Structure formats: structure tokens, C-alpha cells
Image: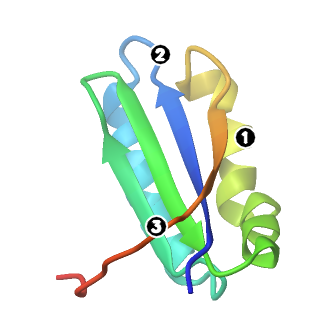
Amino acid sequence: MIKHALFVRLEARPGKEDQVAAFLQAGLRIAQEEATTPIWFALRLSPSTFGVFDAFHDQQGVTNHLEGPIAQALMAKADELFSKPPSIERIDVLGLKNTGAT
């Protein structure tokens, strides 16, 4: 059962919006290789605000993700792409409906 999640809010530097979108789209390939990250979304919340929502079965999955290649790539690009540091919120999942992805 999915019990834990993260929401990361990202604010693009002016003029870097397309690069942030491309960076997040490329992150999907890495996320697909993370066995302990069953749910991963890259989101555009406004023209310059982006987000990542991912969910996990257990705390070890959260730890694996936060220490993994996506987090490392995000932090390596943070100064270049984002106007402020990424905001990471830890979330307890109270319920989930998933009928499959297309």
C-alpha cells in the first residue's frame, strides 16, 4: 500500500521555463528505473511553477528516492534552473485510487 509521498515545488528562473519542462520530462526515464518509486508525476502548475509528486510504499522508498539520481540531478541543476531552492514537502497518504495509467 502506498503510504508516503513527496511534493516538490520548483520555480523556474525567468527564461528557463522550457528547460525546466524538458528537465522534468527527461526525469521520467530515470523514475521508471527506480523500483521503490511506483508513482511519479512531473507537473506544470503555472507558466513558471513546476512540481514533482511521487509516492512510495514505505519510508525506505522515500530515502532511496531522495538519495537517488533524480534528486542528485535536481540539486545539480538547481542554481541554473530555479529562482529559489526546491521546496520539498513530505506527505502521509491517507487513501489512493489508481485505475491504471495510459
The answer to whether marks 3 and 2 mark residues whose Cβ atoms lie closer than 8 Å is no
Q: Residues within 10 Å of mark 1 (few under 14, many from 20)?
A: some
Residue type at tag 2:
Arg
Q: Position of residue 82 (x, y in %)?
A: 56, 23
Q: Is residue 68 visible?
A: no
Please say if 77 is above or below 64.
above
Please say if 89 is above or below 39.
above
In whole angstroms, how far apart are the C-alphas of marks 2 and 1? 15 Å
- Where on the picture, by quarter, is residue 67? bottom right
Residue type at tag 3:
Trp
Mark closer to the observer (1, 3) = 3
Say which element carries label 3.
Answer: strand
Which residue, given by chain and number where applicable, does mark 2 sit on? 13
Say which element carries label 1.
Answer: helix
Which residue, given by chain and number where applicable, does mark 1 sit on? 75
The answer to whether marks 1 and 3 mark residues whose Cβ atoms lie closer than 8 Å is no
In whole angstroms, how far apart are the C-alphas of marks 3 and 2? 23 Å
Locate the C terminus by quadrant. bottom left
Locate the N terminus by quadrant. bottom right
View extreme (left): residue? 102
Residue found at x 48% / y 55%: 53
Residue type at tag 1:
Met
* N-term-proximal mark, 1 vs 3: 3
Left or right: where 2 falls relative to 49: right
* N-term-proximal mark, 2 vs 1: 2
* N-term-proximal mark, 3 vs 2: 2
Which residue, given by chain and number where applicable, does mark 3 sit on? 40
Mark closer to the observer (3, 2) = 3
Q: Position of residue 63 (x, y in %)?
A: 82, 66
Please say if 49 is above or below 99.
above
Residue found at x 76% / y 58%: 66
